[in-house]
Image (spheres, grey):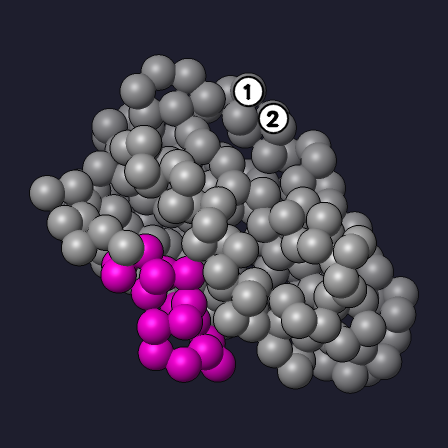
Amino acid sequence: MKNIVLLGDSLTAGWGLAKGENWSCQLISEYPNVSFTNCGVPGDTTTGMLSRFKSQVLEAKPDVVVLFGGLNDLNWGIDIGVVASNLNSMIAQAQHHGIKPILVVTSAIDPVGALPMFGNEPSTVERLRQSVETLSSVHSKKLKMMYGHGETGIEIVDAYQAFEAHAQKYGYSDLYQNDGIHLSKLGAEIIFDKLNCLITKI
């Protein structure tokens, strides 16, 4: 039986969604012959994920680890370079131990719906969104170039780009819960669809 660890924050834990609605729950339902361990911790940062990596990933010896984090780092003003460095460290450790990493580039936030959570300061929201865009357009490509080779080559699911493509046609609001940050059922389904395409091949 394949073993997959899901390491992340509230977007992995499924904060605010009904049981069975989050992308992690959908994967568990879709693959009954795969063992999934959800290690999503609401409020966690990539630094926290890195501190948990040995005990929750390496010691579990999974076939695959799904990494999905960074939004909380950026919310607290941590530089995007630190986020990329933490992800780099987890990806490198995973491959060194024969574990295939899948990186989910975090979704950003609703540029309008999230305003109340950020003091109604558009510049603050835009800075956070720009940081996620940099993670998508610059850092994820570098990680793919460095770690995208061999049997444990990294796979990348770019939730940021998927959400932006949806928003261009339909707007942002249906991708998020009322806070403009956490995933709606639709947002979770989009991520599930992207991951499902990869996991069927593993």
When the figure is inspected, residue 174 is found, relative to residue 117, above or below; the finding is: above
User: Residue at 55% across / 66% down in the picture?
Assistant: 186
Q: In which quarter of the image is residue 14?
A: bottom left
Residue under the image location 51 percent in, 71 percent down:
185
x, y (%) of residue 116? 78, 83
Any part of residue 39 in sight: no
Q: Quadrant of the C terminus?
A: top left
Cα distance, mark 1 to mark 2?
5 Å
**Percent of width and height locating residue 13:** 39, 69
Q: What stretch is highlighted in magenta?
A: 13-29
Instruction: Give the residue at x 55% y 20%.
Output: 145
Task: Determine if the magenta segment contains residue 25.
Answer: yes
Callout 2: SS? helix
Nearest the viewer among 100 and 54 is 100
Q: In which quarter of the image is residue 121?
A: bottom right
Q: Which of 26 and 12 is in front in this view?
A: 26
x then y, percent, for residue 36: 23, 55
Residue 145's mark? 1
- Determine the residue located farthest toward the left in the rendered image: 1
Rendered position, 18 above or below 160: below
Foreground pick, 142 / 194? 194
Asked if residue 126 is among those painted magenta in the image, a careful observer would answer no
* Residues marked 1 and 2 touching at CB (< 8 Å): yes
Q: Is residue 143 left or right of residue 24?
A: right
The crowd level at tag 2 (other Cα within 10 Å; few <14, some 14-19, many 20+) is: some
Instruction: Check the image and name the residue furthest to the top.
Output: 150
The residue that label 2 is drawn on is: 142
